Image: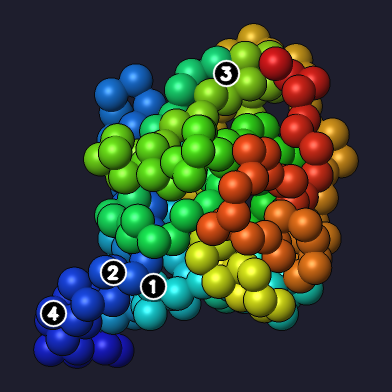
Amino acid sequence: MRSYAAILGLVASLPQLVSAHGFVSGVTVNGKWTAGSDPVWYYYASGSAPATAGWDALNQDIGFIEPANFGSSDIACHKSAKVGKNFIEAKAGDKITFYWNTWPDSHKGPIMNYIAPYKSTAGDLKFSKISQDSIASGNTWATDTLIASNFTASTTIPRNLKAGDYVIRHEIIALHGATNDNGAQAYPQCLNLRVSGSGKVAPTSGVAGTSLYKRNDAGIMFNVYGSSTSYPYPGPQLWTGAN
């Protein structure tokens, strides 16, 4: 059991922690809010943390997954992530908007979204990529657009996706240190998603989290300070079969 004083201590320290990084506090679909996992879940007494759709991870430092750990299941849904208890409710074709608590403007990089058929352990999830954004123009990246949009980013659930339970994986890869080996920073965020509708198309076999990226992929080692007009997205190709 963790003390109330410990919770207060962590909350007091969060402004310093989140000034560097962030997490998804929740999502909206058709105006309905569903909470994600707040890292302070860890400091509640056992069994008393709020139930959310977000996967609870050991990211109390508001940290990241480094490329050296891309072979670990931590890359799936963050460090030692455990399945959330609730579900986002949506229909195939709906827009889902992710709300980050904050994000630093120095941490430029792509934003990617994946879905996986629901499983209760991160190592069993098989992901299909459904959207990706990177360079908008010049040195303006998807993360800059997120900041300008009140720390939000959106994707659309494929309109022909088969009804059922899924895990949606929303991720920023920060590239400010990515000119160096092991310098990129991955911030995967997973939430449970319950899809309704008449869609008939199930995801393909998908890719395990441990096989999504390699530390020397062109999009993992990348000079974000250069004059590139395109970005070599890491991970599998977009899955468009249910679009």
Circles 3 and 1: CB atoms closer than 8 Å: no
Which residue is the site of mark 2? 18
Find the distance from the CA under tag 4 to the CA under tag 2: 11 Å
Of the residues shown, which amino acid type is indicated by label 3? Ala
| N-term mark: 2 or 1 | 2
Counting from the top left corner in percent of width and height, residue 213 is at 77, 60
**Disc on res. 62:** 1
The quadrant in which residue 29 appears is top left
Nearer the observer: mark 3 or 2; the answer is: 2
| N-term mark: 3 or 1 | 1
The quadrant in which residue 131 appears is top right
Q: Is residue 228 above or below residue 48?
A: above
Which residue is the site of mark 4? 12
**Disc on res. 78:** none
Label 4 Cα neighbours within 10 Å, binned few <14 / some 14-19 / many ≥20: few
| N-term mark: 4 or 1 | 4
Choose between 85 and 212: the one closer to the eye.
Answer: 212
Label 2 Cα neighbours within 10 Å, binned few <14 / some 14-19 / many ≥20: some
Of the residues shown, which amino acid type is indicated by label 1? Ile
Circles 2 and 1: CB atoms closer than 8 Å: yes
Circles 4 and 1: CB atoms closer than 8 Å: no
